[in-house]
Image: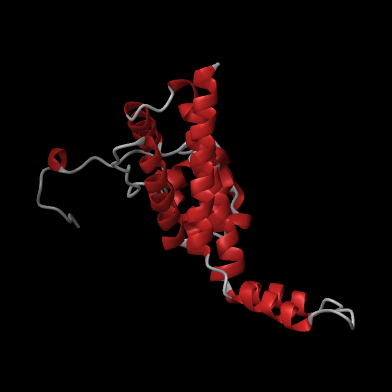
Amino acid sequence: MAKYELNEQQLPQEPRGRPTRINREKIIEAAMKLPSQQLSMTSVAAALGVKPPTLYYHIQSIDELRSLMVEKITWDLRVPVADTWQQWCKGFAYEFRGWLIAEPIRLQLVEMVGPVAGAATDFITQCLESLAKLGFPQKIVVQSFFLLAQAVQDFVSREYEYYRQPANFAKVIEQMQQFTIPSNADKPAYNLLVTQMQQLDFEKFFEFQIAIIIAGLADYIKDNKEQ
């Protein structure tokens, strides 16, 4: 009947009680497979086939779970290298935008917890240190970094809605075309407007928006130095 030839003392000791069915990693993996609007401790527990209280042995709250999910996917964000803080901000904006676009789930998770709230702490610290080394004023570095990150997040959100989701963008065009046009309206001009909307260039829009933010920060820093 004996299954092992080893001495009993040499066998690995199993923990007493019911074997552990889940761990923190399994919880995070299950949560990331759920639609963001359905994410809750109850839905994650159901996906794992356990009762909700079981999850709290590993994760304290839904907020902690969301932060852990963001931390899991932010490992490949890179801190820009630049000669000026202006170049750094532009580099970060493009890096963050590209990272968000690469996988739609990233935008969903970041929208749930904010650009980096409670997660990716090491990455944020490195970014703030890089900005400070480039001469960015220490007293506004945190606010400015989150302002920039939020602006990129908002832009990508609109980009997904109107550009990368053709069905949604088509609805916008269709709604425009259904507007009542007065008989004396310049129909060629109206048609040109619709055509231009269909050819929206988000690359140029993004470049323009980031340039405006950087210029605004530069003006703010200059005005405060003169006071």
Q: Most extreme residue toward the top, as rendered?
A: 227
- 194 vs 149, nearest the viewer: 194
Quarter of the rendering occupied by the C terminus: top right
Residue at (17% x, 56% y) in the render: 3
Residue 55 visible in the shown view: no
Vertical comparison of 180 with 209: above or below: below
Q: Is residue 100 left or right of residue 77?
A: right
Q: Tell me residue 31's x, y (percent).
A: 50, 53
Q: Tell me residue 202's x, y (percent).
A: 52, 64
Residue at (62% x, 74% y) in the render: 196
Quarter of the rendering occupied by the N terminus: bottom left
- 94 vs 195, nearest the viewer: 195
Residue at (53% x, 42% y) in the render: 213
Q: Tell me residue 75's x, y (percent).
A: 34, 47
- Colouring rule applied to residues: secondary structure
| Count of marks overlaid on the render | 0
Residue at (58% x, 47% y) in the render: 112
Q: Tell me residue 12's x, y (percent).
A: 20, 42
